[in-house]
Structures are given as structure tokens and as C-alpha cells.
Amino acid sequence: MNIPKIYLETTMFNFPVADDSPQYRDDTRKLFEAIKAGKFEPYTSIYATDELQADPDQENRERMLRLVGEYNVQVLGNDEQTERLAEIYVREGAVKATYPTDARHIAVAVVNGLDVMVSLNFQHLVKRKTIEETARINAREGYKSVGIYTPRELIDHDENGCGIPERSPASE
């Protein structure tokens, strides 16, 4: 059985320490517990770690970055393929031009052949238009699409023993 390879977008490191959002905090903590139990192989990127490094609160920044090492999260770098694909997402409107890092998050997961991207960024990533448009572009460009899910969607599906959830247009 293959262990799903998941990309942890920046919000996954923010929410385990977010006391103002208990539901998302708890869901994210459950995801990290599942990672620790070996149910998922975790990845992130320099795009996420750069965003975490920019947090002005030193204590919060250190707690978030500590999760990367604590859970053996592999940090992926940038490359020409990732930058090219992210530029296509932005140029074709799958991701707003004002949020190029969000396009890079998706692109790095796609270029590296990961199964799932986990995020709580509902404005730019976990939304129907982004999911559908990036999937269309990925297929045209010869890439396998990456599923984009919330921690709750992934954990609920995993608890039912069904592997990676399938996203249908009706589920959005």
C-alpha cells in the first residue's frame, strides 16, 4: 500500500497554534497526528518556510518552523518547471496575480508528483475555481493533478479507510 504524499501549505503550520479557530486547530492537529502515525508522507516547500520565516512574532514563528523538523516534513525547493507552471496558473486566471506564492504552492506539489495539497486557504486555494482551473491546466501541460483538500476532508476520508478522497464538482 502506497502512503499518500501530501503537501502542507503554509496554513497547516499556522493553525496548530491558532487558538482563535478551535475547529481548524483541532483538525490540523489531527492531521499532524496522522502524519506521526505514518499515514501520510509530508512535504512542504521553501515557499511555505519563507512565509513562516516572515512571521513577525518570533515565538509563533519558531513554533511553526519546529513542526517541519518534528514531523520530518521534507522541504521542496523551487525549479524552472515549478515557476513556469505557477506563471501559467496566474496568466490564465486560475490563481490571482496578486497571490503568486499560492500558485507556486500548487505548482510545486504538482511538479513533484504529490497526491494531495492540504490547506485552509479558502480565499485562493481550497475553492472550486482554483481546483478546476489548475486541474485543466495540469492536464493540458502533461501533469497529474493534485487534490486540494482541507485537513478535515483528508482525515475524515482516511478514518473511513478509503484512501485519498475523490473530488467531484458536486462536492464543492
Image: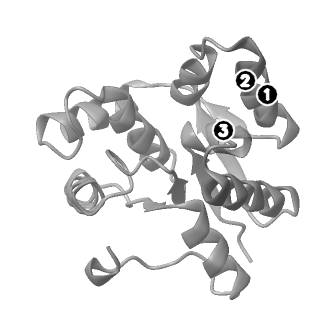
- The answer to whether the residue labelled 2 contacts the one labelled 1, judged by CB atoms less than 8 Å apart, is yes
Using the numbered discs, state the Cα–Cα distance from disc 1 to disc 3 in whole angstroms: 9 Å
Name the mark on residue 13.
3
Q: Which residue is mark 1?
A: 63
User: Element type at marker 3?
Assistant: helix
Q: Which residue is more in the foreground, 88 or 129?
A: 129
Q: Quadrant of residue 166?
A: bottom left
Where is 130 relative to 105, above or below? below
Residue at x-position 20% and y-position 47%: 94
Amino acid type for the residue under numbered disc 1: Arg
Q: Which residue is more in the foreground, 125 or 107?
A: 125
Q: Which residue is mark 2?
A: 60
Percent position (x, y) of residue 113? 50, 53
- 121 to the left or right of 89: right
Using the numbered discs, state the Cα–Cα distance from disc 3 to disc 2 in whole angstroms: 10 Å
User: Element type at marker 1?
Assistant: helix
Residue at x-position 74% and y-position 78%: 1
User: Element type at marker 2?
Assistant: helix
Mark 3 and mark 2 lie on one chain; the one further toward the N terminus is: 3
